[in-house]
Image: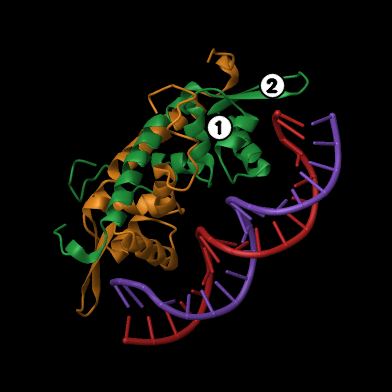
Chain colours: A orange, B green, C purple, D red
DNA sequence: CGGGATCCATGTGGATACTG
DNA sequence: CAGTATCCACATGGATCCCG
């Protein structure tokens, strides 16, 4: 990335297959995935806690995303066979590696919001 | 994030609306968006260069994403009304702010790949 | 409480063809 | 070269009902 050599021989093109960015966004895609991870980043959460923290999510989507993240080994599920049942979701070590992504997206999201805020025409002709 | 206080009074819940992460992933979502930005991060690119660098993308998707990114002020389009026509795409300053996100995702993507690689049962019982 | 199953509306994205 | 237009297949995701 940092080597600006346009005609380097070793890196042919860089197809989507095998591209780390593609792998990551493949797993993190989906409307709620990032938000779920963001919640889990603050600690262990139960199913109902997640559902409560994510206003608007349906139980289907929550369960689905949770399962996806589990299959990708980003979180673990701990089931307490009690009555009433209780399930705890906890990020794995790999799951915690998502934090820099969340952080970066938070930073960018803020700049995006700030830009759209100061977006009125008063200085639309600012140089690039 | 770093304050583990579960019952802090100032942060009620954090609905998806207004959440920076949601804003960012809203703009960066889409199958090819990240890859396009990644290409543009290395410098100015023409339409055909992008299409060439992104094997499998259709002209429709490329144009569509490019327009989206332009509307979000993440890139600018410079059209040369020559024959044959020539269009150059260049990230804006705001667009370059995506780089940390790409970098973070690259890092995570690599760890993901490495984990899936060393995923055979030989040490499935490693501690979290 | 923590889901699974089903149905369905919409969005996303691919293929193809056409244009300035 | 740099797109646009149209059609269509499939994936995403919401609503609702049901179950252990």
Q: Which residue is mark 2?
A: B79
Q: Is residue A41 above or below residue B49?
A: below
Farthest residue, direction front: A9
Q: Considering depth in this image, is B12 or B29 the residue closer to the camera?
A: B29
Q: Is residue B11 visible?
A: no
Q: Quadrant of the N terminus of chain B?
A: top left
Q: Considering depth in this image, is D1 or A34 the residue closer to the camera?
A: D1
Farthest residue, direction left: B127
- Disc 1 crowd rating (10 Å Cα; few below 14, some 14-19, many 20+) is some
Q: Quadrant of residue A80?
A: bottom left
Residue beneath the point at 43% across and 60% down: A57
Q: Is residue B74 above or below residue A64?
A: above
Please state if D7 lies on the left or on the right of A79 as rendered.
right
Q: Is residue A58 above or below residue B59?
A: below
Mark before the other along the chain sequence, 2 or 1: 1
Residue beneath the point at 40% across and 56% down: A55
Disc 2/disc 1 C-alpha distance (Å): 18 Å
Q: Are marks 2 and 1 on the same chain?
A: yes
Where is residue C2? Give x, y as percent: 30, 71
Closer to the observer: label 2 or label 1? 2
- Disc 2 crowd rating (10 Å Cα; few below 14, some 14-19, many 20+) is few
Identify the subunit bearing mark 1.
Answer: B
- Looking at the rendered structure, the secondary structure element under dot 2 is strand
Q: Is residue A48 above or below residue A6?
A: below
Q: Which mark is residue B72?
A: 1
Please state if B4 lies on the left or on the right of B25 as rendered.
left
Q: Quadrant of residue A99?
A: top left
Where is residue B48? Give x, y as percent: 64, 32
């Amino acid at each position: 990335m940092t080597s600006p050599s346009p005609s380097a021989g070793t890196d042919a093109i860089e197809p989507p297959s095998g591209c780390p960015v593609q792998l990551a966004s493949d797993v993190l895609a989906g409307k709620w995935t990032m938000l779920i991870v963001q919640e889990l980043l603050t600690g262990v959460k139960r199913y109902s806690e997640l559902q409560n923290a994510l206003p608007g999510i349906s139980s289907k989507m929550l369960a689905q995303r949770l399962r996806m993240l589990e299959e990708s080994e980003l979180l673990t599920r701990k089931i307490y066979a009690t009555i009433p049942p209780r399930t705890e979701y906890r990020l794995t070590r790999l799951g915690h590696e998502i934090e820099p992504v969340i952080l970066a997206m938070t930073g960018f999201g803020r700049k995006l919001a700030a830009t759209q805020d100061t977006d009125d025409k008063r200085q639309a002709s600012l140089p690039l």
